[in-house]
Amino acid sequence: MTDHHKRSLLKLAALAAAASALVACGKKDEPAPTPAPAPAPAAEAPAPAKADPLKIAFAYVGPVGDGGWTFAHDNARKALEKEFGDRIVTSYVESVPESADAERVIRDMAGQGNKLIFGTTFGYMEPMLKVAADHPDVKFEHATGYKTAENMRTYDSRTYEGAYMAGVIAGKMTQSNTLGVVASIPIPEVVRNINSFTLGAQSTNPKITTKVVWVNEWFNPPKETEAATALINGGADILFQNTDSSAVLQTAEKMGKRGFGWDSDMTAYGPKAHLGSAIIDWAPYYIKAVGEALDGKWATGQTWWGVKEGAIDLVSLAADVPEDAKAKLEEVRSGLKAGTYNIWKGPISDNTGKEVLAEGTVADDKFLGGINWYVKGVEGKVPGKN
């Protein structure tokens, strides 16, 4: 290599070293870059405002401790609280007479902000209609009635199915062939139950007759006791009732006869006398009604539920009920549940011998809602009927 080349290479190397030194010096003097700020946390979406609970009130015709009708409704009210929790608030007023007091109580319930009001007896129908007209923003539910409005509907249980099933057992268990019924108020609902009990008994024992004593009240234990005593003294060895207390069964127990519970399981009130209890479970309907109100799907109409919908049953049969009676009861229950068994199917005659339902004819709900006569086998006349 010539001296010229060596000098050239040395020069290039020197220039490269100088350039590197300049770059290093520049990096040292240059300020460090500012780090990018951390992203701000996303703002949490505000929680949706919690809806106020639906306020629901119940007007009861009897005391919640009656052991029967009102007790059954109050059990269903408690089932509502369990089902819907803090989405609802319930309250009730017990022993509300079927009079001007009913309108006052129901109007007060609406004034207190209740948006769904249940009236649990037939006699509240007209008072509820009046209050409903003045409170279009409130929904009203009337038990056992037949009048509706845009914001008032009716609901009922086919209690006659429970009465018929009790009759099936009574026909098998009677020794005197005389049955007794303590009845409340002579409206079609009650007359229908007396007749259905009798038809059920006749299905297992065509020889039976039924005696009736009316007390003209839903809940009056002393009067119910007097009526039950009169029936037993008149030869009845099995008692049935369409009243709201346990007095009838208790009287049967004291007098050594047999009887049935009504509306609720009354076994504990007369364990030796008790043959079974025709019960109503209002909870399925109440849960449906409240669910519709909460979901904005409530609409007026009429509902009548029975064994098929789980609203009616005969429970707690006595140990001495014979197997053939139990088999017949199960046949009836299964048929009612499936819709294949018709209690009110002709031929049926009233107790004057007049045919009221032709052979093969099945009664519709309109027919059932207008019954004001006794079937063959029931003694006497319906009060108020000429």
Image (cartoon, helix red, strand yellow):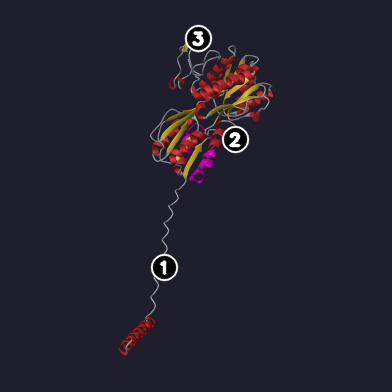
Determine which residue is flagged by label 3: 353
Image coordinates of residue 254 in percent, x first then y, are: 68, 24
Going by the numbered disc 3, the residue's amino acid type is: Gly
Q: Which residue is mark 2?
A: 65
Q: Nearer the viewer, residue 89 or 285?
A: 285
Q: Earlier in the sequence, mark 1 or mark 3?
A: 1
Cβ atoms under marks 1 and 3 closer than 8 Å: no
Is 83 magenta? The answer is: yes
The answer to whether residue 269 of the structure is visible from this angle is: yes
What distance separates the C-alpha of mark 1 from that of mark 3? 96 Å
Q: Secondary structure at mark 1?
A: loop
Residue closer to the observer: 191 or 49:
49
- The image shows residue 99, relative to residue 55, as above or below, that is above
Q: Amino acid at mark 1?
A: Ala
Label 3 crowd (10 A; few <14 / some 14-19 / many >=20)? few
Task: Give the residue at the far bottom of this rendering.
Answer: 3
